[in-house]
Structures are given as structure tokens and as C-alpha cells.
Amino acid sequence: MSAETNDCDVLIVGGGLVGSSLAIALDGSGLRVAQVEAVASQINPLANPDERCLALARASVNALSALGVWPLVEAKATPIRSVHVSRRGEFGAIRLAAAEHGLDAFGATCPACELGNGLLMRLERCVNLVRHAPARLSAIESDDDGILATLAAGEGEQRLRTRLLVGADGTGSFVRDALGIGADRFDYTQTAFVATVQPERAMDGRAWERFTATGPVAVLPLADRRAGVVMTVPTADAARVAVLDDAGFLAELHERFGYRLGKFSRLGKRVSHPLACMFAQRVIGPRAVLVGNAAQTIHPIGAQGFNLGLRDALTLAELLVAQARAGGDAGDAALLRRYVELRREDREGTAAASDSLARWTASEALPLKALRSLGLIAIDRIAPLKQAVVARGMGFRGHAPALALRGGV
Ligand SMILES: Cc1cc2nc3c(=O)[nH]c(=O)nc-3n(C[C@H](O)[C@H](O)[C@H](O)COP(=O)(O)OP(=O)(O)OC[C@H]3O[C@@H](n4cnc5c(N)ncnc54)[C@H](O)[C@@H]3O)c2cc1C
């Protein structure tokens, strides 16, 4: 089939946070972009704040601003002005203050549903984007010129040719399986309970991370004096925690987190997530590439999953926009190889850091306990170590996509 018969240059499979960010980053590039999303998505003006709260790194806030998404979300976001990291039952803590690094904030927190709404609003303004939702990618066939994708919607089917197929279809990626790409997985046998609470004391933009032997607890500042909580428990204990009444759940939270923020009250809806990591053995195939959770799904301990996936999307968009300007093929093998090179350090480094943090902070082995306390003290007191932690927490590791640098960092 000749190149002219392609229906689109880029077909993005998945309309989650990462796939949608990529579609927006390609807006105005001149590329014909299509997106397929299995679930019917609709902007909800009364987004339910009682669900997952995301910590967005500064690099992500910069990029979302440059993409015109942040102005649609900012009113629902809360700046992270300081961070406190500690381990229950051990001495030593890391205290990071944005002002000490000449910054107003390290990033911001935002309910995931509000970010989803902002992305959808911005998607609606994209030119040259064709959205298929609800529709599911159900088969692919490739040849030298492109990939023929079958989209299933209700009873019907539609075929679409693309020069490049992007798998932004999450942890159980159909695209990854269809390309025959293997994945390494590890089950942490931990379950994260996500909820919102009302802390007695004002948080003043401080995010808290407390490690315990049974998994980490994060308490993130939200608007209206609310806080987003991620409480991790061993999966063997998850059924018991799931049926606790509100008072019982809050007591469990206090047992792990303590009373630094006074008493927690007004518990919102609880949602649980079993935690496992997945690392795709390759992220490219002929005329195909994986981004976001489809490429790597990491433990939420460092709050990096979306931040990392967004950097996948931004880097890919940067290469595709340059290719379009030069009149090149969006599915060019050299472009995909360059993508792999540019993403290697951030992808491998961030996934490894989240994984070691999840294992290292949970261990009760005595020598490790002492080392861990010393580690916390060292990071807190040694300026270059602290600076490195801050830079990585803000989303700067390896090649930084240009969009992530806009905003004056
Ligand atoms: C408890 C918890 C807390 C977290 N906290 C943070 C945080 O603070 N900061 C942070 O950066 N990250 C955080 N994360 C991680 C973050 O939520 C994810 O990394 C991110 O949402 C992944 O987005 P995605 O678009 O890659 O994948 P997904 O959100 O999984 O989206 C994939 C999309 O593809 C669609 N799809 C699947 N198959 C098909 C198909 N065949 N055809 C069409 N569509 C298809 C699905 O319907 C879905 O909409 C957290 C995760 C958890 C579990």
C-alpha cells in the first residue's frame, strides 16, 4: 500500500493521562493524529475530589503550562512548598523547603479527576485530532509502510492505517502484547488505600512521606484544608482494612502516620489499588512505541508514575514535531531508536529508584535500620545529596524535554 493511503500519521491507543498529554503535545504539529480510548470519556464539572490525588513534579507543571492544560487545572491544584520524609520508629528525617532552593514550589498536588477534566477540555480544542471513544484497538497488522489497526466500537469495526502506533494503553497494554514485547513484573504484595481526610492542623503546602515496615504512607496537601492520603498495607491485611468503619480506618492511619497533623477527620471515599511493577523489555517495535504505564508501571512510593510517563510523551512529541517539520516519516526506525536513547536514563533510573525505595524502606533487618537512619540524616545535611534528591523529585533526570524546562526552572 502506498504511503498516501495512510489515514493518520500517529495513532495513540489510550486516552488516559499520558495518551491525552501526547495528543495535546502534537497539536499544531501538522501531523494527522488519531486517538482511540476504550472508555467513553466526558468532562465532569462536579469531579469527585474523593479519589486519587497526584503529586505533580515541577517539570510536569511546567509542561502542562506550556501545553495550555495548567490554566484549566490550576484553581484545583495546591503548590508543594516543602516535603518531610521519615521512617516510623527510627531517627533521622529529610526536610526539603522549596524556598531554600530559590523556588516557590517543588511542584503541585492535584486530584487526578481534575487533571483528567483539564486534559479533556484541552483535547476538545485540538485541531487535526480525530478521537475514537469509546472504541477499542482489537488487532494490528503491519507492513513496511504502516500499521493497519482494527478498532472495535459496539457491534461495528473500523480499520485505520497509521505510520506510527503509540501504545499508551496502560499496564495490561494490548499494543505491547500484540508487538510480542515481554515484560518483567514484580508483585509487592502491598495494597494502597487512597482517600481524602481533613487534618486538624493546616498543612501549609507540606507533603509528608512516612515509611513503615508494612509500606509507606503519604499525606499530600489539597485545597480547602483537605489532604490526600495513600496508605499502603500488606495485601494479606487488605481485606481487613477494607471493611474497617471510618473511625477504624482513621485509627489505622494514625497508627502508621502519627499525630504530626493533629487528628484526621471527615474521611472521604476509600479506593484500593494492589501494587505491582512492570517493566517492558523493549519500548519500540516496527512503527510502534510504548509510553507511560504501558512501558513501565512503578510503585507509587516516589509519586513518579505519571510524571515519568508524561516525560515519555513529551520526548516522543519533540522528536515527532521535528520529524514533521523536516517532512520525514513519523514511524521512521531511526527516530524510534533515538527515542529509546533519550529515555533510557530517566526510565531505568526512576523505575529502579522507586523499586529500591519500596523494598529498602520496608525492611526490618537491623543493619539496614541503622543505615537507613544514617541515609536520611546524610541526605538532610549534605547539600549536594539534598540537591540531587530535589532535582530528581522535580522530574529532572537525564535528557529533559524542552517543554518541561519552560516555566523558568
Ligand atoms: C495509588 C496510586 C497513587 C499514584 N500517585 C501518583 C502521583 O502522585 N504522581 C504520579 O506522577 N503518578 C502517580 N501514580 C501513577 C499514575 O496514576 C499512573 O502512572 C498514570 O495514571 C498512568 O497513565 P497512563 O495514561 O499511562 O495509563 P492509564 O491511566 O492506565 O490509561 C490507559 C488508557 O488506555 C485505555 N485502553 C486500554 N486498552 C485499550 C485498547 N485496547 N483500546 C483503547 N483504549 C485502551 C484505558 O481505558 C485507559 O484509559 C499513582 C498510582 C497509584 C496506583
Image (cartoon, grey):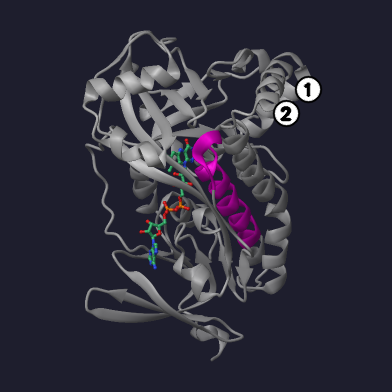
What is the secondary structure assignment of the residue under circle 1? helix
Cβ atoms at labels 1 and 2 below 8 Å apart: yes
Q: Residues within 10 Å of mark 1 (few under 14, many from 20)?
A: few
The residue lying at 61 percent from left, 86 percent from top is 144
User: Which region shows up in magenta?
Assistant: 298-321
Specify whether tag 1 is near ligand 1 (CB below 8 Å): no
**Relative depth, front residue between 165 and 306:** 306
> Percent x, y for residue 225?
33, 16
Give the percent coordinates (x, y) of residue 27: 49, 56
- Tell me: 68 left or right of 278: left
What secondary structure prevails in the magenta region?
helix
The amino acid type found where label 2 is placed reads Ala
Q: Does the magenta run of residues contain 306?
A: yes
Specify the label residue 384 is tagged with. Answer: 1
Along the line of sight, the residue nearer the viewer: 221 or 194: 194
**Residue identifier under label 2:** 388
Magenta run includes residue 221: no
Q: Quadrant of the C terminus?
A: top right
Q: Position of 79 compared to 327: left or right?
A: left
Residue depicted at x 57% and y 87%: 143
Where residue 263 appears, as percent x and y from the top left, is: 33, 10
Q: Which three-letter amino acid code belongs to the residue tagged 1?
A: Pro
Query: Is label 2 within 8 A of ligand 1 (CB to nearest ligand atom)?
Result: no
Horizontal side of 343 relative to 139 (left or right) equals right
Mark 1 vs mark 2, CA separation in Å: 6 Å
Residue at position x 48%, y 51% in the image: 18
Residue at 53%, 64% (x, y): give it: 30
Residue 399 — which label? none
> Up-down: is 8 above or below 290?
below
Asked whether the viewer can see residue 181, the reply is yes
